Amino acid sequence: MTNLAALLIFLTIISVSSAQAIDRIGINYGKLGNNLPSPYHSIELIKSMKATMVKLYDADPEALKLLAGTDLRVSIMVRNEDIVELATNETLASQWVQDNVFAYYPSTMIRSIMVGNEVYSNHNAEQWDNLVLAMQHIKNTLHTHDIHDIKVGTPLAMDILGSTFPPSNGTFRVDTLTTIVPLLQFLNKTGSYFFLDVYPYFPWSSNINTIDLNFTLFRGNITYVDPGSNLTYTNLLDQMLDSVYFSMSKLGFSNIPIFIAETGWPNQGDLDQPGANDYNAAIYNRNLIKKIVADPPFGTPARPGTIIPTFLFSLYNENLKYGPRTERYWGLLKPDGTPVYPIDLTGNQTVFGPLQEPTNNLGYKGRLWCVVDKMGQTGNASELGLALRNTCSRLNGTCESALGPGKHCYEPVSVVWHASFAFSAYWAQFRNCGEPCYFGGLASLTTRNPSHGSCHFPSVSL
Ligand SMILES: *[C@@H]1O[C@H](CO)[C@@H](O)[C@H](O)[C@H]1NC(C)=O
Ligand SMILES: *[C@@H]1O[C@H](CO)[C@@H](O)[C@H](O)[C@H]1NC(C)=O
Ligand SMILES: *[C@@H]1O[C@H](CO)[C@@H](O)[C@H](O)[C@H]1NC(C)=O
Ligand SMILES: *[C@@H]1O[C@H](CO)[C@@H](O)[C@H](O)[C@H]1NC(C)=O
Ligand SMILES: *[C@@H]1O[C@H](CO)[C@@H](O)[C@H](O)[C@H]1NC(C)=O
Ligand SMILES: *[C@@H]1O[C@H](CO)[C@@H](O)[C@H](O)[C@H]1NC(C)=O
Ligand SMILES: *[C@@H]1O[C@H](CO)[C@@H](O)[C@H](O)[C@H]1NC(C)=O
Ligand SMILES: *[C@@H]1O[C@H](CO)[C@@H](O)[C@H](O)[C@H]1NC(C)=O
Ligand SMILES: *[C@@H]1O[C@H](CO)[C@@H](O)[C@H](O)[C@H]1NC(C)=O
């Protein structure tokens, strides 16, 4: 080999490894808020944060135009409700690619197309059965146009696994098997990724007495040895990733890489949601970034040395999301574009100023009531009245026997008071079924017992 050839190979290796290094951390650009900056301002923010990739939950023409000429690698999404049509009509699928990819590519660096979002988390058999065919049609169109740098995938949540622990015991849910196998065949054949939405926050927050918080935040001195594989784990994310790798291997697919389509940590939560705070969110995301950008890459115990590209969830705190308070607080940024806590997506900065110590890591112990909050009190009165009637209609007479004229909770006669009673009653009855204290953003939990006299508000004891 001549010196020149050796030098060229050397340079190629350098450029390949640095190209990989910059394509590891991206941001999910969710827009479910009524107070968020414009797409233009949002993309400027994403660039200023030095993200290298951005994932959209749609194929918004405005965003895709604005992303042209930037260095950002872009992921776009097919809506779940379009899957069946794209599977049954290949002309339509081809048209979808024309309209949403070719109209912007290559100046907008579209690098992946997500077909649907967490399709297996809803029981829509038609979408399950059509998913792979829709993906195939999209891939065919790309192939016909000789485009090979766009991956076609579908982000799935951890609920596709029937068992996750220990990681070597990972298996797919039995009901998904008939459709998961063709999906894995597609991903394997096309050299795509298994896109995974993976949140160590959830298993930790529902098992705070058995899972160590530091283990979840990548700073454990704790290690766990999987008895089935003898692999040693130092953090919960690796366990979750490996449970997916083991599940795939059991079906014969040992070479499909994982791409983290969403991960993160909530910076606020309800009183009954432990550990949702700025401090833990900062530690989780900073340590995650350090792990993901490390060179040589760490991978996981079952797949050491592999690169795991990652989209953080999410760009903003999104105030229109339904559910418990954590749902609205996954953002790296507040709606005004300022950071919730300092973070460096390049992983370069390792020293940050102190953050306020968290106070809710151990979870709340005591009684909680779900009452109309400030938003509900100062907002649209007819909306609150509507929420009161809806809630009472689902309570089979509870409201009538407590809030009717002359009954023990009738006074003071106000929509706010009556709605607080109804919300508390409903939440206390259905919290175990996953019902959040939300009521369209009109309610919050309180530790102060609102009961008076003979009027007792139902509560939940933690
Ligand atoms: C398939 O989609 C194309 C393009 O939208 C449309 O013109 C055609 O009518 C559709 N075919 C069927 C069978 O629906
Ligand atoms: C493995 O998973 C199965 C089924 O999900 C479960 O019954 C079993 O207890 C698990 N094994 C271990 C060692 O936890
Ligand atoms: C968790 O990690 C922090 C920082 O390394 C350390 O100060 C703290 O003592 C650890 N907590 C436990 C319970 O191990
Ligand atoms: C981990 O570190 C904490 C705090 O430094 C210490 O209290 C604990 O004993 C350590 N645990 C183990 C298993 O070494
Ligand atoms: C794990 O290690 C133990 C003790 O070294 C050994 O007996 C066992 O066969 C190993 N299991 C696996 C799955 O490698
Ligand atoms: C996965 O793809 C590789 C390379 O194309 C192929 O050799 C292998 O048989 C495939 N695995 C399965 C389980 O289909
Ligand atoms: C990392 O920090 C060093 C020193 O502060 C700086 O020279 C370098 O450009 C930074 N790298 C990135 C990717 O920001
Ligand atoms: C108040 O809410 C009702 C019911 O949702 C809606 O029809 C009405 O337009 C709202 N009024 C204002 C001022 O927002
Ligand atoms: C109300 O009654 C229906 C029918 O009996 C039942 O399905 C439902 O669970 C009840 N709701 C409450 C809040 O008890």
Image: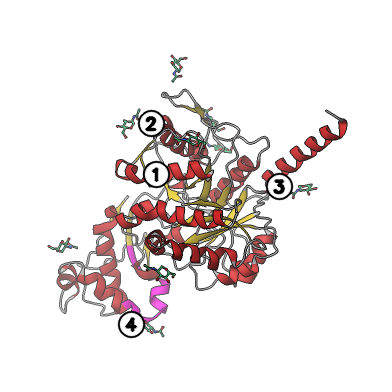
Q: What label does residue 349 carry, if any?
A: 3
Q: Measuring 44% from the left and 38% from the top, which residue is drawn there?
A: 244
Q: Measuring 53% from the left and 40% from the top, which residue is drawn there?
A: 257
Task: Assess disc 1: are there few (<14), some (14-19) or many (≥20) residues with their C-alpha within 10 Å of its C-alpha.
Answer: some
Range of magenta residues = 370-384
Q: Measuring 52% from the left and 38% from the top, which residue is drawn there?
A: 214
In screen coordinates, is 17 left or right of 409?
Answer: right
Determine if the C-beta at disc 2 is less than 8 A from ligand 2.
yes
In screen coordinates, is 151 left or right of 72?
Answer: left
Q: What label does residue 382 carry, if any?
A: 4
Q: What label does residue 182 carry, if any?
A: 1
Determine if the C-beta at disc 3 is less than 8 A from ligand 7.
yes
Which mark is in front, 1 or 2? 1
Question: Hey, what amino acid is under mark 3?
Answer: Gln
Which mark is in front, 2 or 4? 2
Q: Earlier in the sequence, mark 3 or mark 4?
A: 3
Is mark 2 in CB contact (under 8 Å) with mark 4? Answer: no
Q: Nearer the viewer, residue 422 or 409?
A: 422
Is mark 1 in CB contact (under 8 Å) with mark 4? Answer: no
Q: Earlier in the sequence, mark 1 or mark 4?
A: 1
Is mark 2 in CB contact (under 8 Å) with mark 3? Answer: no
Distance from disc 1 to disc 2, alpha carbons, whole Å, reads 22 Å
Helix, strand or loop under label 3 = loop
Question: Hey, what amino acid is under mark 2?
Answer: Asn
Q: Residue 72, image x and y in percent?
A: 66, 58
Q: Earlier in the sequence, mark 2 or mark 3?
A: 2
Residue underneath mark 2: 169
Q: Measuring 49% from the left and 25% from the top, which residue is drawn there?
A: 231
